[in-house]
Each structure stands twice: as C-alpha cells, then as structure tokens.
Image: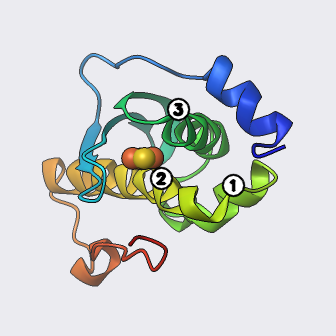
Amino acid sequence: MLYSEKVMDHFRNPRNVGEIENADGVGEVGNAKCGDIMKMFLKIDDGIVTDVKFQTFGCGSAIATSSMATEMIKGKSVDEALQLSNKAVVEALDGLPTHKIHCSVLAEEAVKAAVKDYYDKNGIAYDACMFKEASCEHCH
Ligand code: FES
C-alpha cells in the first residue's frame, strides 16, 4: 500500500478546510516544483491558535498533510505552531512515499507564512531567520 490509512483518511475527509474571515494571519505559499498552492488562515487569541483553516490547490498528499497540520496546531501556542515541522506531520500520518515528502513542506511553510503575517500585522518583532524558506532535499 503506497499510502497509509491515515493519509487516505485525511485526504478523503480533510479537516479544517475553508477560510476564516478576518483571520489574524494568512499565509499563502506555492511549491515551485509542481505549481501547487496552499493558503492557511489563523485565528489567534492571546498567543493561542484558536482556529485554523486551509485551502489548497494541491495534490492528495498536500491535502492530507495540511489537514493533519491544522489538527496539530489548533489550540497550541503560536510558538508551538512555528515549531511544527513537516517531518512531524509526516510521522503523524504514518509516513509518505519518499517522492511525496516535498508536498508536506507546503503545510509547514503555510503555517509559518501565516504566523509571519500575524506578526507583521501586529507589529510583533521576530527573527527573520525563522522564516527562511525551508529547502526540500527531496525535490528533483
Ligand atoms: Fe505538488 Fe504534492 S505534487 S504538493
């Protein structure tokens, strides 16, 4: 079986699809390799991600990883959300085929872009290095 049951579940029934009106942070990122795009919306209260939604024009693996990523950061602090790595998301999904790992990077980058937007909008200082484009060694 190429895809784990969890991947198939999140692909068929993605959680937190949609958009949040008046979101506190919105991040949109694209995958240069395949042209897929992802948009992430965050509602943030007192430094806690109280709601999160995503929209994607992407492949099944991008949908599944985004769905899992939203579940993993909901209710967490902004700092914890920033620490979410694509590796952790892939592990939570019981893995992805190697050639689909790059798809999971989209979710991580979208979360970071949304937090950066939140920081920018609220004049919160941050270390720009935190938001350096994650490079993906698996893309070819
Ligand atoms: Fe583009 Fe998966 S093939 S994100």
Circle 1 packing at 10 Å, graded few (<14), some (14-19), many (20+), is: many
Q: CA gap, disc 2 to disc 3?
A: 25 Å
Position of residue 110 in the picture relative to residue 100 (left or right) = left
Per the image, the residue denoted by label 3 is 50
Q: Is ligand 1 within 8 Å of the beta carbon of the residue shown at mark 2?
A: yes
Q: What percent of the width, then of the height, locates residue 85?
A: 57, 66
Kindly state the secondary structure of the residue where label 2 is placed.
Answer: helix
Numbered circle sitting on residue 96: 1
In the image, what residue type sits under mark 3?
Thr
Q: Is ligand 1 within 8 Å of the beta carbon of the residue shown at mark 1?
A: no
In the image, 46 versus 9, the foreground residue is: 9
The residue lying at 52 percent from left, 54 percent from top is: 104
Q: What percent of the width, then of the height, locates residue 72?
A: 66, 45
Q: In which quarter of the image is residue 65?
A: top right
The residue lying at 56 percent from left, 42 percent from top is: 61
Q: Is ligand 1 within 8 Å of the beta carbon of the residue shown at mark 3?
A: no
| Residue 51 seen | yes
Q: In which quarter of the image is the N terminus?
A: top right
In the image, what residue type sits under mark 1?
Leu
Asked if residue 99 is positioned above or below residue 75 in the image, the reply reads: below
In the image, 20 versus 50, the foreground residue is: 20
| Pointers 2 and 1 in contact (C-beta within 8 Å) | yes
Asked if residue 37 is positioned above or below residue 106 in the image, the reply reads: above
Position of residue 103 in the picture relative to residue 123 (left or right) = right
Disc on the earlier residue, 2 or 1 = 1
Kindly state the secondary structure of the residue where label 1 is placed.
Answer: loop
| Pointers 2 and 3 in contact (C-beta within 8 Å) | no
Q: CA gap, disc 2 to disc 1?
A: 9 Å
Numbered circle sitting on residue 54: none
